[in-house]
Amino acid sequence: GQQLNQSPQSMFIQEGEDVSMNCTSSSIFNTWLWYKQDPGEGPVLLIALYKAGELTSNGRLTAQFGITRKDSFLNISASIPSDVGIYFCAGQLSGGGADGLTFGKGTHLIIQP
Amino acid sequence: EAGVTQSPTHLIKTRGQQATLRCSPISGHTSVYWYQQALGLGLQFLLWYDEGEERNRGNFPPRFSGRQFPNYSSELNVNALELEDSALYLCASIQGASYNEQFFGPGTRLTVL
């Protein structure tokens, strides 16, 4: 089946630093989604990307849909303590969600005050 | 507007028993997805229901089954529980089969002893 390689696996950063994480795949995706999951909760949708090359921002978060449609990155600027959590990328192969989303294994973000 | 709800929050069973998990989608959403998130792993697609029908299933054995009711709520049943079924089970809903943005519930933590 399809696999998403998400990196880094974990990040230890200082408050105020910028964060960058990415996902790559051997498959072409039509949609890229980025989610954040807090302990004991379900993932919360942060950003959805639908077109190759698309760059979308949501507050301090910026994500891009790679030109090849096989990758995406998420940047967080000026990190704050509440950014702590696990960030997942997810790809959708086709409209209609026949196969569900394919998720990366997540990036654990840990912020040191 | 209420989000996706799941019940119960926690469920403890023993090997060989059956578990039933429930999900209510966002009002107006007709598609429901089920995912399994084992400890330390990403989300794995289990089942997709749309308009009351099972549309697709992931790479899971037949003892994982479910249904969708006329009000679009859904039930996941796991028969003959095994220890490795212990996981967080997440339900997500989308507005319709042509949409890709999935919204997740808080999950049901299933523990098999």
Image (cartoon, rainbow, N blue to C red):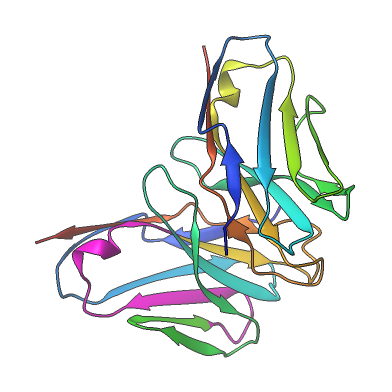
Residues drawn in magenta? A65-87
Q: Quadrant of residue B62?
A: top right
| Residue B44 image point, x, y percent | 63, 45
Q: Which residue is drawn at 71% across and 50% down?
A: B33
Question: Looking at the picture, does residue B39 appear above or below residue A10?
Answer: above
Task: Say left or right for B20 vs B1.
Answer: right
Q: In which quarter of the image is residue A19?
A: bottom left
| Residue B28 image point, x, y percent | 74, 64
Q: Which residue is drawn at 64% across and 69% down?
A: B101
Could one spot residue B37 in this view of the protein?
A: yes
Question: Looking at the picture, does residue B61 appear above or below residue B107?
Answer: above
Quadrant where the image shows the C terminus of chain A: bottom left
| Residue A110 image point, x, y percent | 23, 56
Nearest to the observer: residue A9 or residue B63: B63
| Residue B71 image point, x, y percent | 81, 50
Nearest to the observer: residue B75 or residue B61: B75
Is residue A85 one of those drawn in magenta? yes
Q: Residue at x 57, y 47 (%)?
A: B43
Task: Say left or right for A82 vs A42.
Answer: left
Is residue B45 one of those drawn in magenta? no
Q: In which quarter of the image is residue A66?
A: bottom right
